[in-house]
Image (spheres, coloured by chain):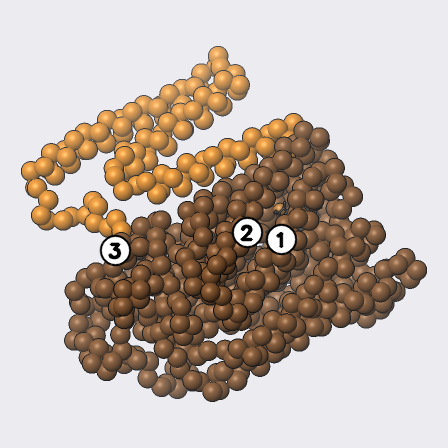
Chain colours: A orange, B brown
């Protein structure tokens, strides 16, 4: 109850404003969608191109993947809107814990 | 009493519980199932103590001893302590935040049935084959080498039960984030709700490593993989890491709700606001966070090297700081309060020194160099029983007495309650205090017998006698429960007289919709504030209106049943000449997926309790 009704279809909200907001959002989504396809293409090219070694390709693809996840979260799953503080908090905590864990694994198991 | 709670036939009641999505009834289910597993685990403990009563005893064989030991630990942690904690969370947390139910009632029920079928599967190992026998930690180099199906029961059973716990944890998180009553800000939440919140976050992050570990174990043992087999290029240490990344947060998953229950008790029976509420919240969150940074203290002797050991030793000792904050806050809550020594308060007061001793031995174990002496001796056994029994189990007993009226509408007998306390308290210290010394004298843990003339005899006798005293205490509690239920004397909203939080503003047990009108929360200890201003109940935050309720459903049971069936297929398919394993595995999984599919396509919008019916209730003098 504490923060319900945030982005629901409340009819009293100004229609004009919402239409503009939606159009803008749509534009962002189309742009990011195009960018994501582009990034995917780059990833394929990086693997197909003969001149790169695995030491370049793997980190590079991982980097592209991280960028894509961020696009996905912020532009398609509305993480940039208000009312997502709790999910954000939990995701950052999860990332932090996963990072520390992997750091430990790489330093003390497979040193 | 609402129209829904009329007397019903036995069959109808059973069906009601099989399909219920009401958090209060699911709490009953968790309490009963967890209680049963607690008795089974206790019985196994008694057998262990009988075997160790005298040197060279042959009450059980070495093999059976390993099974008893493993099942005792596994049952107590996963099938008794966890669900009992969940019972109180389910019963109390939604009431404390002023909600009508949890966020996902269907998932709540699914979580319970997954846990129950997982636990059932694990315990069927006694009858179908051999029980798991590689310890509750089931270290891979040992467990991969075991013949028979014991370890398979462990891996599959815990997988199913763990899934249920994970679902339950997520559900509580969403509930606390989204369903708080108007005015219930985060910093007005009762301490038990706060600990539930942090614990659910710990579950969210700690159970996936266990899931992964168990999957790898399942594939190693049943499907020919070699993750842990060093001879095939695997790494047996990975299991230990996975297990303890889960395992250390798990011990905090158990102890934090205990802290929550005791925080409520200290405030209620000292008739004072909890001292240092915000520092309590801070300490809880900090403990939860640090809990993820210390797992390797269980692996000091594995050979991680001095640098890793030192880092984890320092991190481990850091946890003692927020824990210390809490202890002082409880003491200051009692300081100057008008204390009533009811049964819950007795447990709470006894908890402080008992748990403190466990914390002190914990810090001793946490310094890596010392741990080389203590590791795998009875000293460790003494440590974790002091924290788990002296902390968690004390809290479960205290909580049972405190919340019994809220859950069942009757008061447990105080005299019998105090007898339980005395028997259990004395038995507990007898059993485990001496084990510190047994450990220091060199008695290894998990060994089925010892030789005469090593100076272990007397201490082991003392320890075993203590175990029987604890059993006696539990039996008195059972008698108490029976007497109370037979007498069936109903009590009012606030039977302890000094309830502070929202749950005590409701009738005991609360109506199935909890709050007729959502309450307006004006501060910490919301109900106490209203009482101090001379009001009888909470000020409503909304006009009386229709209440939307979820429908009961049998599907959670079916989803869990499918996994239960699949587990048998997975386990037996590798046997010589087995033909039915794979089909059963596939059938079970399809059964589960099919049930989920039905749930997804069938629209179930629940029902409404019309306003008129709620007004009717009011006339009969029942308040919400
Ligand atoms: C001040 C806080 C604590 C510290 C510093 C601490 C430290 C330790 C250490 C270093 C060990 C490993 C000992 C060894 O195997 O050689 C250990 C074992 C254990 N601790 Fe704690 N502990 C603390 C609190 C707790 C709490 C609150 C619980 C549970 C509620 C707990 C449950 C356990 C269990 C179950 C084990 C044994 C696991 C096993 O090997 O089977 N501890 N503790
Ligand atoms: Cu630990």
Pointer 2 or 1: first along the chain: 2
The mark closer to the camera, 3 or 1, is 1
Q: Is residue A67 left or right of residue B623?
A: right
Give me the residue at 30% from left, 37% from top. Answer: A79
Residue at mark 2 shares a chain with residue at mark 3: yes
Give the letter of the chain under mark 2: B
Residue at mark 3 shares a chain with residue at mark 1: yes
Q: Position of residue A42 (x, y in %)?
A: 37, 21
Instruction: Return the residue at label 3.
Output: B182
Q: Position of residue A14 (x, y in %)?
A: 8, 42
Viewer-proximal residue, B217 or B92?
B92
The numbered disc on residue B577 is: none
Give me the residue at 27% from left, 81% from top. Answer: B3
Establish if B103 lies above or below B472: above
- Say whether mark 3 is within 8 Å of ligand 1: no
Instruction: Return the residue at label 2.
Output: B327
Location of the N terminus of chain B (image quadrant): bottom left
| Residue neighbourhood size for the residue with mark 1, other residues' Cα within 10 Å, grouped as few (<14), some (14–19), many (≥20) | some
The answer for how far apart the CA atoms under marks 2 and 3 are is 32 Å
The mark closer to the camera, 2 or 3, is 2
Q: Quadrant of residue B523?
A: bottom left
Mark 2 and mark 1 residues within 8 Å of each other at the beta carbon: yes
Q: Secondary structure at mark 3?
A: loop
Give the letter of the chain under mark 1: B
Instruction: Return the residue at label 1.
Output: B356
């Amino acid at each position: 109850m504490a923060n319900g009704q945030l982005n629901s279809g409340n009819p009293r909200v100004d229609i004009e404003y919402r239409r503009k907001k939606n159009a803008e959002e749509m534009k962002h989504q189309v742009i990011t969608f195009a960018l994501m396809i582009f990034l995917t293409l780059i990833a394929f090219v990086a693997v197909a191109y003969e001149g790169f070694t695995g030491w370049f390709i793997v980190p590079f693809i991982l980097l592209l993947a991280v960028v894509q996840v961020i696009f996905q979260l912020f532009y398609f799953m509305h993480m940039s809107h208000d009312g997502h503080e709790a999910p954000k908090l939990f995701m950052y905590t999860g990332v932090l814990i996963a990072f520390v864990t992997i750091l430990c694994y790489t330093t003390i198991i497979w040193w | 009493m609402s129209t829904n709670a009329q007397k019903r036939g036995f069959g109808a009641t059973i069906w009601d519980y099989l399909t219920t999505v009401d958090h209060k009834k699911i709490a009953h289910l968790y309490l009963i199932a967890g209680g049963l597993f607690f008795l089974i685990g206790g019985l196994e403990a008694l057998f262990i103590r009988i075997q160790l009563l005298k040197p060279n005893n042959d009450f059980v064989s070495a093999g059976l001893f390993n099974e008893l030991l493993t099942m005792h630990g596994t049952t107590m942690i996963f099938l008794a302590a966890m669900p009992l904690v969940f019972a109180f969370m389910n019963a109390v947390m939604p009431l404390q935040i002023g909600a009508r139910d949890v966020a996902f009632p269907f998932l709540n029920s699914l979580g319970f049935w997954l846990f129950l079928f997982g636990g059932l599967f694990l315990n069927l190992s006694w009858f179908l084959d051999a029980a798991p026998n590689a310890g509750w930690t089931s270290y891979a180099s040992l467990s991969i080498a075991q013949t028979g199906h014991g370890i398979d029961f462990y891996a599959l059973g815990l997988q199913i039960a763990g899934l249920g716990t994970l679902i339950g944890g997520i559900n509580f998180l969403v509930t606390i984030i989204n369903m708080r009553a108007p005015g219930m800000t985060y910093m007005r939440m009762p301490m038990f709700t706060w600990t539930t919140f942090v614990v659910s976050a710990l579950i969210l992050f700690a159970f996936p490593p266990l899931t992964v570990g168990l999957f790898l174990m399942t594939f190693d043992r049943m499907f020919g993989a070699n993750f842990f087999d060093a001879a095939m290029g695997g790494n047996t240490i990975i299991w230990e890491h996975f297990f303890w990344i889960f395992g250390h947060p798990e011990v905090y998953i158990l102890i934090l709700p205990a802290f929550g229950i005791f925080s409520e008790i200290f405030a209620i029976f000292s008739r004072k606001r909890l001292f240092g509420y915000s520092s309590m919240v801070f300490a809880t969150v900090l403990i939860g966070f640090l809990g993820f940074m210390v797992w390797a203290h269980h692996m000091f002797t594995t050979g991680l090297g001095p640098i890793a050991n030192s880092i984890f030793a320092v991190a481990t000792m850091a946890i003692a700081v927020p824990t210390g904050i809490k202890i002082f806050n409880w003491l200051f809550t009692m300081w100057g309060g008008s204390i009533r020594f009811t049964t819950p308060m007795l447990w709470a007061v006894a908890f402080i020194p008992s748990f403190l001793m466990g914390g002190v031995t914990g810090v001793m174990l946490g310094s890596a160099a010392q741990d080389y002496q203590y590791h795998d001796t009875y000293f460790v056994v003494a440590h974790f029983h002091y924290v788990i029994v002296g902390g968690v189990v004390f809290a479960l007993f205290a909580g049972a007495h405190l919340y019994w009226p809220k859950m069942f509408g009757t008061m447990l007998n105080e005299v019998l309650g105090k007898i339980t306390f005395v028997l259990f308290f004395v038995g507990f210290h007898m059993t485990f205090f001496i084990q510190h010394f047994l450990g220091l004298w060199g008695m290894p843990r998990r060994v089925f017998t010892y030789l005469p003339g090593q100076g272990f005899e007397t201490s082991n006798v003392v320890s075993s006698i203590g175990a029987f005293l604890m059993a006696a205490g539990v039996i008195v509690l059972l008698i108490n429960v029976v007497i109370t239920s037979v007498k069936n004397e109903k009590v009012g909203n606030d039977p302890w007289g000094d309830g502070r939080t929202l749950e005590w503003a409701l009738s005991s047990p609360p109506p199935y919709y909890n709050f007729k009108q959502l309450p307006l929360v004006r501060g910490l200890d919301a109900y106490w504030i209203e009482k101090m201003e001379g009001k009888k109940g909470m000020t409503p935050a909304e006009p009386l209106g229709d209440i939307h309720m979820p429908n009961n459903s049998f599907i959670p049971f079916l989803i869990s049943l499918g996994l239960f069936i699949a587990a048998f297929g997975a386990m037996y398919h590798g046997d010589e000449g087995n033909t039915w394993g794979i089909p059963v595995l596939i059938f079970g999984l399809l059964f589960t997926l099919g049930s989920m599919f039905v749930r997804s396509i069938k629209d179930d919008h629940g029902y409404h309790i019309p306003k008129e019916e709620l007004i009717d209730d009011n006339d009969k003098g029942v308040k919400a």
